[in-house]
Amino acid sequence: MGTYDDDAFRAAYDKVMARWPADRGTATVPTPYGTAHVNVCGPRDAPPLLLLPGGGGATSASWFAQAAELARVRRVHAVDLPGAPGRSTVDGGRAPRTVADLGDWLDAVLAGLGIARADVGGHSYGAWIALHHALRAPGRVRRLFLLDPTLCFAGYKAAYLLRALPMLLRPTPRRVRSFLVWETGTGAPPARAGSGAGKALDPDWLRLQEAAAGFPAARPVTGPRPAPEALRALDVPVLLLVAANSRTHDASEVAARAGELLPRGETDVLPDVSHHALPVAAPPGTGRRLREFLG
């Protein structure tokens, strides 16, 4: 396994956080699974919004491209996941092991922040956690937005898992970069003309992903997709934004399945963006769409 450099990771994390709104602050919350690190911005008297990042090398810092727009209407709380790259710590080595554990962790985070009911948003694995939270405690979720959620409405593509396997077995900065370049359809900066979203990978974000390689992470919690009958009974407004160029799963299948199952769901397919490029390189207007949904 590659050598992990904590100083380099923290420096890369701080560089991405420097792109958050100037009023940003932090909070630390004790939970049964360690201390949660939360990045906070927005008016103190605004309704609360909890943001959950994707898995792998993603952290709460990755919301930098959406934080300012969301903070116009919400008090934003973006939390690093327990046992994953970031600044949350797993005290005593007790990381969540089940979906119920993740729910207990999230309840503790919200209680520690003094939040009884919140809007919730997540990307990828974070969206999977957010959806399970809404199914478990719908009375605590005002509105829910999901950015290209994994294992919620469709499974992974076999090609995606095969391509990710070397990085998962032996993560190194080079393997992380190679995988992200492949999934996002971009060249290493500058991007190749006509490829994918036609953009280079954000250099600060990419450096943070590379620096997370070899992070001493706990095994992530996995589980089945939410049951169709549970989704049909979900009485919470849901906005699903699907990445049209995602190589993770079939975007049309995700959109169609969600349309069948979510009684209060809205679905948009975002053009020219891949799974891992959300939320850092979403098409123009995405932040406004999220803000309007939150209302």
Image: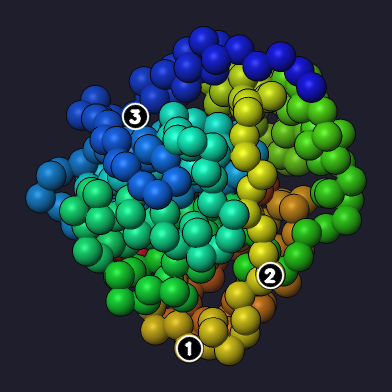
The residue beneath circle 1 is 233
**The disc labelled 3 sits on which kind of residue?**
Trp
Name the front one of labels 2 and 3: 2
Residues 161 and 218: in front is 218
Residue 274 is at least partly visible in this image: yes
User: What residue type is disc 2 on?
Assistant: Pro
Q: Residue at x 77, y 51 (%)?
A: 247
Query: Residue, x 37% and y 38% (percent of image)?
Result: 35
Q: Which residue is mark 2?
A: 224
The mark lying in front, picked from 1 and 3, is 1
| Residue type, mark 1 in image | Ala
Q: Quadrant of the N terminus?
A: top right
Q: How is the image coloured?
A: rainbow
CA separation, marks 1 and 2? 18 Å
Please indicate, yes or no, whether residue 58 appears anywhere in the rendered image. Answer: no
Q: CA distance from mark 1 to mark 3?
A: 36 Å
- Mark 3, other Cα within 10 Å: few <14 / some 14–19 / many ≥20: many
Q: Position of residue 6 (x, y in %)?
A: 55, 15
For label 2, the crowd category at 10 Å Cα-Cα, with few meaning under 14, some 14 to 19 and many 20 or more, is few
Please tell me whether mark 1 or mark 2 is closer to you in this view. 2
**How far apart are the alpha carbons under marks 2 and 3?**
34 Å
Q: Nearer the viewer, residue 285 or 112?
A: 112
Q: Which residue is mark 3?
A: 20
